[in-house]
Image (cartoon, rainbow, N blue to C red):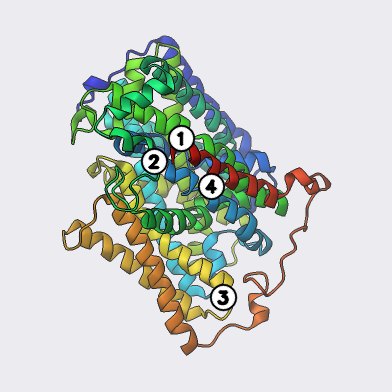
Amino acid sequence: MDGGGLRLNMNALDYTLLGLYFVTVLGVGFAARRAIRTSVDFFLSGRSLPAWVTGLAFVSANLGALEIIGMAANGAQYGIMTVHYYWIGAVPAMVFLGIVMMPFYYGSKVRSVPEYLRLRFNRPTHLLNALSFAIAQVLIAGVNLYALALIMQALLGWPLWVAIIIGAAIVLVYITIGGLSGAIYNEVLQFFVILAGLIPITVIGLVKVGGVSGLMDAVRESRLGEAGLHAWQDTGSTANPLGAHWFGIVFGLGFVLSFGYWTTNFAEVQRALSAKNMSAARRTPIIAAYPKLLIPAVTVIPGLIALITVKGLGADQGDLVYNNAIPLLMRDLLPNGVLGVAVTGLVASFMAGMAANVSGFNTVFTYDIWQAYVRRDRSDEYYIRIGRYATVAAVVIGIGTAFIAAGFSNIMNYIQALFSVFNAPLFGTFIIGMFWKRMTALAGFWSLLSGTVVAIGTYLLYKGGVIHFNSDLEESFWGAGLAFATVAVVAAIITPLTAPKRDEDLRGLVYGTGGIDLKADVLAGDQAWYRSPVLLGVIAVALAIVFYIPVF
């Protein structure tokens, strides 16, 4: 696209703020390097970080192109129904991860999600998941990198290739040098920078449209109408802005896609595995759930503001595609100085998302592919070196996959398609295997493979016009649901025909086999009642329900 209509009038102050951010994130990477002595330090921060740090990093790792550009685009395209991605499509799964699944991840001392599958099932299942995860991460890293480059080209006039190289190089440097600690501490910084960039857009935008009541009145008069202000209205059919039935929302998004992403995506789980003890690991995703509840205020609301204030938004091409909702608001609303903060916030969001993908990739590649199947029993220094090589490879491949994202006018649809293919069947295999100790190793492998094939087949048949859905998002909901159902059916068929593992081999990996000490390594302060993962989780879910009431 040309991007001329999006060009920002940035001055020296704006560029200074952006430059200071680049210098700071590189400085954090160099500072983190001093703490790296072993491969566990490089890939898992030595399992030493406090819960508030890992919790903010957990939510920041998700604040990439998907969250900022994609959710604002959805806010403009689908209205308030976009909050489903937060209140039913994130918070319950984050709480479930902390209360139910983290004890198995952290207690078993696995270094990655695929490694859990090796212990629970077998090496073929492990390798299949490691390879599929690696592919997914470089594809999603490409989304973040492409979005960053496209925005920098449009807003600042940088050539696309320059923007891609600068963004990729900075992420490459601070992860290669500082490892996961460099990524995590930068994600904490990026969390606050992102909010500092988005809050002014929301506040100034609301003032322009006459506050919340003015925005609601304007949405009623827009193409969305009254339906744009409700989350559940007309979901008894597909006659709603999202084009999705309540069953698809609850089962496809709220259960399969949501739980598949938040509980099995190693790019997120890795932050919790770096926590200092079991209590901190369990609280990590639950602490992250609290800011997640409020993020729609700075993503969905700006999307609605863009729908009202940007004439012609929603064009198939050019500057008015939904993905440009946030940049268009920046152009129209923000004065210099504040503009520099907002641009820095956008850059931070893309870099946080890409860093999570890259750090997840280098860990899985090193531990679950290279060490497990190529070169075993080497020194820690050797695997740290391989991890740094993997980081370079992930960034280089991400530059290539960035251009795949160019074919999607709404990158949220593209990422949801990726989640339905890679995360949904994995979650099915995980959750059944974690609660059903009779499920066998062969059932684990074939259920994961068949679920993935069904998800890919559903997507290809939809794109080929063989089957029909009302929207790309509805396809991702049903594709995920079909993949999960396939996993369950295949597991039920194969398990009775094959031999299970012994109970002692499943100890600490499956419910009902024992081996999990929820108080292991807990510091005295972490035993305080107000730090209870169950209490914090129940409050977070209750708040998600309460938040739905005004927009039901």
Secondary structure of the residue carrying tag 4 is helix
Query: Which residue is under mark 1?
Result: 296
Q: Closer to the camera, 521 or 168?
A: 521
Which dot, 3 or 2, sits closer to the camera? 2
Report how far apart the C-alphas of labels 3 and 4 lie in the structure: 25 Å
What is the quadrant of residue 168 in the picture?
top left
Secondary structure of the residue carrying tag 2 is helix
For image coordinates 59% across by 39% down, the residue present is 290
Q: Is residue 512 visible?
A: yes
Query: Which residue is under mark 4?
Result: 91
**Which label number is shown at residue 82?**
2
What amino acid type is highlighted by mark number 2? Thr
Query: Which residue is under mark 3?
Result: 436
For image coordinates 38% across by 20% down, the residue present is 214
Badge 2: residue crowd in 10 Å (few <14, some 14–19, many ≥20): many
Q: Earlier in the sequence, mark 2 or mark 4?
A: 2
In the drawing, does residue 55 fall left or right of residue 134?
A: right
Q: Earlier in the sequence, mark 2 or mark 1?
A: 2
What amino acid type is highlighted by mark number 1? Pro
Secondary structure of the residue carrying tag 1 is helix
Q: Residue furthest left?
A: 465
Q: Earlier in the sequence, mark 1 or mark 3?
A: 1
